[in-house]
Amino acid sequence: MSKNGLLIHYDYCTGCQSCAVACQQEHDFPAGKCGIEVTEYVYEAIRKPVAIDFLPFPTELCDLCINRYQQGEKPACVKHCQAACMSFGSLTELVQQMEITPRSVLFSPR
Amino acid sequence: MDYDKGIEVFPTTIWSAGAGCHGACGQKLYVKDGKLIKVEGDENASWNQGRSCPRVLALTQYVYHPDRLTTPLKRIGNRGEGKFEPISWDEAYNICETKLKKIRDEFGAESVVFAQGTGRDVGGPISFLCYNYGSPNWVQLGLSGQSCYTPRLGGMKATMGDFSVMDAGQFSAERFDDPEYEVPKVILVWGQNPPPTCSDGFFGHWVVDCMKRGSKIISIDPRNTWMSTRAEHHLQIRPGTDGALALGMLNIIINEKLYDKNFVDKWTYGFEKLKERVQEYPVDKVSKITWIPEKLIIAAARLYANSSPAAIHWGVPIDMCPEGTTVAQAITQLWSITGNIDIPGGNVIARPSHGVTTYPYSTEELVELYGQELVDKLNRLRIGCDTYPMVKGFRGWAQPDMAIDQIDSGKPYPIKAAWIQTANVLGGQAARAKFHYEALKKLDFVVVVDLFHNPTSMALADIVLPAATFAEKDSFRSWWVPLGVMHKVIEVGECKSDWEINIEMANRLNPNCKYKNVKELINDRLSVAGMTFDELVAQGSQAMPPKGHSSRPYRRHEKGLLRHDGKPGFTTETGRVELYSKAFESWGVDPLPFYREPAQSPVNSPELYAKYPLIMITGARSHMFFHSEHRMIPWLREKNPEPYVEVHPETAKTFGVYDGEWIHLENDMGKVKRKVRISLRVHPQMIHTLHGWWKPEMKGSEPDLFGVWDYQINQIVPGPQDSNSGFGGGQYKTTLCKLSKIRE
Ligand code: SF4
Ligand code: SF4
Ligand code: SF4
């Protein structure tokens, strides 16, 4: 069985930060600690004058919600993502999914 | 999460302080030993399908925050000194009862205003208390021109006789899978960046859901946003000129014959008159007014009109345009003449679910509940009803700008007290915030009902009553769908719900008060749905209107489901969509849409513009905060720790400011502190900043008032409203200012 990871279809990430607060609530992290950090990018692009993107980055603290996994539940971030742009699963499957979701990134946390 | 270890899970509906929003998502509350330990989205709620926003996910930090007000308080020092002592509910009620009755005896009940802020479930309880006391003055105090949804509601009502929302399948529990549903081919997102919140009963991310299913976006927004950068066309409009743009689009669609001829012939009234009016708005003229290139306006109008179904989703900037109701009228005409009314994927008529309303609308119901005398007062003594026929004729509010002027002047009759409920008027909505502060300090008696101390409670309150979050209360909602209930699963200190407080108080002020407790009232209002509060709780807290009910789409005008007489048509005088509005005519408002330039603008006030060359946009929604709430919640505040202002790189150069620098935004009304964020999000001639800032970590007593006079942006927003109907034209998005260096 392949290792699990997170696929983020960042084209649809709205920067809402639900993933971050869901993670903090789930792990009882205080402010300042979080398993995922969302960064905003505002830049001049080729096809349009301005592009705006967000990218959530799983930090050292991400344990892929191992406790939830054992209960058969999705990671807290994936479940609550308002844009439904995060997927959890085996890396092999996620790579396949990635082929049909341009502008996405795959994370293989610890 | 292990359910065996004494954890109980309660599905509930959101519509209240806590998350703060206007949405109706379903959330599951995890409770252990009487304590809320976690919140998760409810997968069974068709509204959000398991999703949650950051504010609801941070609920445990809100509910158990050490600063929560947990007992009633009585002021013991001078006003503003910040000295309060805890008292019992009984003592608090006794004081309020004695004071309010004395004022009523001496000056009449109308001399007390009952003030609310943003909508949520407070409208029911506060109007209930206001009317049981006998005052006609229920008011969104500080909200200039009542520029938040009410003007749009007025524009829709005056055109269609009903209200309408973009169809994202929300009226069916099956949502996108409902075979009757169709995704809009095009969504015209007008004046909103939907993701940050669920405004006006609409889950912001539904637009994103539709985009994934193929909807193209046309974005009308002065800023670059997540949405605008993903749009087919982005119309970067000059703030406040939306009326001209709507008229220009109508001009193109009518002159190029892109409208739905069948619909126009069969279901509308006054098309020829509208056609004549829009000739005054050719695209070159509109382009000059709005700063949008001609070819973009044409492309957007064509794409919208040639796509079917197409939907319009809009935001509060429409209300804040000069003559907001008129701008809303023109936009309503766009979805009308293109035949997008009440079709799948269009703009569906929105009625409160199952016909349930949280407070009475009709005169008959008002008479039955509160007596003829109150209804007479509403028509005679309500602030603004003499001046503005539309204020008199459309809904029951007092006019906010006139209310504060009257509190200040005592004319035409004195205002002696205010009951301010879950509304941080001074730290939040009040344009001319300092004037509000000075005027409100003149009152003899002020009650503040809230969850946290804030600038308003500190500066003004004589009595403070602690209110509850949605997890701590029984309440209900029905705009638009689902029909939902909140139910009490935890208790915090002695906090009570707005409904509980106001029913208990109302019974002291009116011996004939119809309801003795909250459940009695809720069940009575739910009765038209044939359901009780307990039944709704038992079925997971939400219900959708059944097929064939008048609160469920589609094509109800064809089926005779809209009108009382059961005939096909709309609920207007002519039974048609009135492009020439008879309702506006009867209110002395131009029956056809027109454009008016904002009071402060490069065109209208060139001298002011020379001094203050930046158009300041405020009032956008935030993922982290709801208006002036949530600044004390650690998980949220850390993600937006300081009030910033977005400044274009060129503008930053002109004014010599650097990224991260603390500066002042300044105009003739004063100056407000902001931290510079240099960003391509904004137009070089505009700046953008969030409203509602105060700092709970600062000192609460005077003169600090939690830093409100450092950060409250609305102290440099002028008033009164820029509109002749009384509705619309709060100048929150069109005020001129400049950047200035802080020298200390
Ligand atoms: S998978 Fe779990 S631990 Fe990792 S970022 Fe998401 S919520 Fe946090
Ligand atoms: S929850 Fe989803 S949409 Fe929101 S910031 Fe995280 S990844 Fe992006
Ligand atoms: S903003 Fe939306 S997701 Fe958040 S609590 Fe309100 S309805 Fe629910």
Image: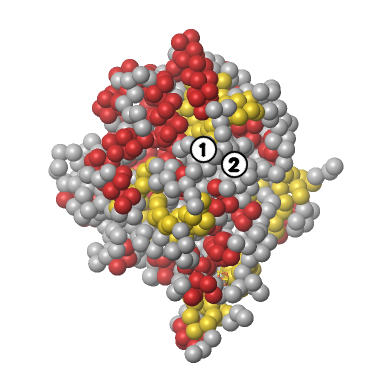
* SS at circle 1: loop
| Quadrant location of the C terminus of chain B in the rendered image | top right
At horizontal 44% and vertical 48% (from top left) the residue drawn is: B489
Is residue A101 placed above or below B552 in the rendered structure? below
Q: Position of residue B508 (x, y in %)?
A: 42, 21
Q: How would you rate the neighbour count of disc 2 (Cα within 10 Å): few for under 14, some for 14-19, many for 20 or more?
A: some
- Disc 1 residue type (three-letter): Cys
At horizontal 63% and vertical 66% (from top left) the residue drawn is: A34
Please tell me which residue lies in front, B568 or B179.
B179
Please tell me which residue lies in front, B521 or B375.
B521
Does ligand 3 reach within 8 Å of label 2's beta carbon?
A: no
Residue occupied by mark 2: B68
Q: Position of residue B72 (x, y in %)?
A: 56, 31
* SS at circle 2: loop
Residue occupied by mark 1: B495
Q: Position of residue B568 (x, y in %)?
A: 16, 46
Q: Can residue B169 be spotted in the picture?
A: yes
Is residue B256 placed above or below B535 in the rendered structure? below
